[in-house]
Image: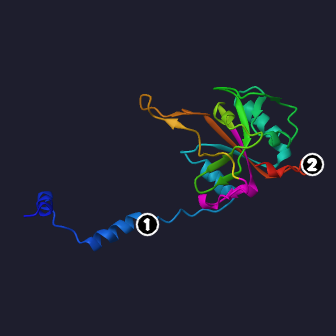
Amino acid sequence: MSARAAILAALGDPPRDPTTLATEAAALLTRPERPAATASVDALIEALAAPSIAATCERLASSADLPEAVARYLASSGLPPELMIADSDLAQMADWSRLDILAAPPIDGGAVLTCATTAVCETGSLVLETGPGKPMLANFLALHHLVVVFEDSIVAHLEDIPQPALAPRAHYWVTGVSGTTDIEGQYVRGAHGPRFLHVLIVQHVNSASNKRDIC
């Protein structure tokens, strides 16, 4: 008896037909159909509301409504009327005079506001990109992460994310806040970053500012 035959005999199963094995392997490697999704505000809100993401959302008609919406969120969360805006162009898009704008991000508290270049309905992911005036570290230090999403940047699937003409230094995909069950088996949100994610979905940019090229 050959060594191969001895090993197969020890396994207790007869040798399988190579053609059958190849067919089964190909079936396992076949990419499953991606879940149906549409690029719509309602689809994005539904994805963000999933328990695995648990983000809150608010729809705004114009970027001019951002300061009031942010102030409202801060007040409802028991926070002082202050935040860091981690996007220099976003800071110029509206009148933020009613809020105290911080020069540095709060750590383990407070709020940071930024803008997503794309939002994906399939997974509820928000795509953040580095760039001039867009310090990325600030988005992971505060307790509350507020993200602006413009309706025309919403896509259905991950494959639909547009490729920028000039690639940023890094992409960050935020799909809800981080969590862990390492501590006594209890689920804890914000284990490695913000504990709360609030998405502000804006229909259009205030015509007075005309700064849509930021995100």
Badge 1 or badge 2: first in the primary sequence: 1
Q: Position of residue 28 (x, y in %)?
A: 38, 64
- Quarter of the rendering containing residue 130: top right
Quarter of the image where the N terminus is located: bottom left
In the image, is 191 to the left or to the right of 94?
left
Q: Name the element at disc 2.
A: loop
Q: Which residue is found at the position 62% from the left and 48% from the top?
A: 48
Q: Position of residue 97 (x, y in %)?
A: 88, 32
180 and 213: which is toward the camera:
213
In the image, is 214 to the left or to the right of 48?
right
* Residue closest to the far right: 208
Which colour assignment does the render follow? Answer: rainbow
Residue identifier under label 1: 30
Q: Position of residue 206 (x, y in %)?
A: 87, 49
Q: Name the element at disc 1.
A: loop
The amino acid beneath tag 1 is Thr
Residue 108 on the magenta span:
no
Span shown in magenta: 146-166
Residue identifier under label 2: 208
Q: How many marks?
A: 2
Neighbours of disc 1 within 10 Å: few (<14), some (14-19), many (20+)? few
Instruction: For marks 1 and 2, give the CA distance.
Output: 51 Å
| Residue 10 against residue 18 in the figure, above or below | above
Camera-nearest label, 1 or 2: 1
Q: Which residue is found at the position 44% from the left and 28% from the top?
A: 183
Residue 113: image tag: none
Residue 158 on the magenta span:
yes
Q: Which residue is found at the position 54% from the left and 45% from the top?
A: 51
131 and 151: which is toward the camera:
131
Q: Are marks 1 and 2 in contact (CB under 8 Å)?
A: no
The amino acid beneath tag 2 is Ala
